Image: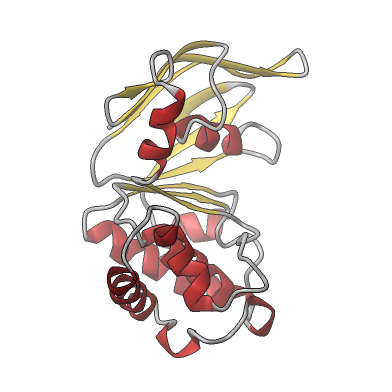
Amino acid sequence: MIEFFNVTLSYKNEFLLKDITFKINKGDFVYLTGRSGVGKSSILKLIYFDEFPDSGNVTVNNFSSSQIMINEIPVLRRTIGVIFQDYKLLPDRNVFENVAFALRVTGAKSKEIRKKTVRVLTEVGMGHKRNQYPPQLSGGEQQLTAIARALINNPFVLLADEPTGNLDSRASNQIMNILEKINHRGTAVLMASHNLNIIKQYPHRRLNLENGAIKEV
């Protein structure tokens, strides 16, 4: 489903990743750990082809980093949900519109947009906040909205970049319980995190990135 094979990536003439190889299968829940700046976010960007390796190959659902065409990248990205630490919500649009926007850009019909948006907001417990705007929400509520947006296109994998990094323990547990539920439903989750307490509380396979190398711990 997702495979890195001998992937090398450099930044400002310094290696971030050196010949890393790993695979994530359908329905997996995997933590990606390592100190800040070590390249965790770059691995996520390589998966949705926002970055490309200097050498080696990344394969995502039969799309290859060495062969994918520019016009195929948006097609692939619609099958991937991405959750950011800083939420990346549109402050001038309410919760409903922030989530619906991901469908509008695909040309979906209004009836379908409303049905899917209401369903996914209800699923993450944000249906009652649909008319509020991001500045009116807590950090946890903003992240739940971001998760709903990531789920709207029924992705095969969720890429979560430090999704609990700005949240207190109560909100973090709420986010993790949602991610667990999503994973149990069959969606793979790859979560970058340095929160070892969360990882111990919700144990799953763990890949650690250090000095450009990756290993299972």
Total marks drawn?
0
The quarter of the picture where residue 184 lies is: bottom left
Horizontal and vertical percent for residue 45? 54, 35
Which residue shows up at 54% across the image and 41% down it? 33
| 166 in relation to 206, above or below | below
Horizontal and vertical percent for residue 10? 66, 17
Q: Determine if residue 47 is in view.
A: yes
Which residue shows up at 60% across the image and 62% down it? 87
* Direction from residue 102 to residue 122 in the image, left or right: left
Of residues 126 and 96, the one nearer the viewer is: 96
Of residues 89 and 204, the one nearer the viewer is: 89
Horizontal and vertical percent for residue 5? 40, 15
Q: Residue furthest bottom?
A: 128
Q: Residue furthest top?
A: 55
| 17 in relation to 32, above or below | above
Q: Quadrant of the C terminus?
A: top left
The quarter of the picture where residue 141 lies is: bottom right
Q: Determine if residue 169 is in view.
A: no
Horizontal and vertical percent for residue 4? 40, 22
Of residues 54 and 192, the one nearer the viewer is: 54
Which residue shows up at 63% across the image and 76% down it? 134
| 216 in relation to 112, above or below | above
Q: How is the image coloured?
A: secondary structure
Q: Quadrant of the N terminus?
A: top left
| 31 in relation to 213, above or below | below
Of residues 32 and 111, the one nearer the viewer is: 111
Which residue shows up at 61% across the image and 57% down it? 85
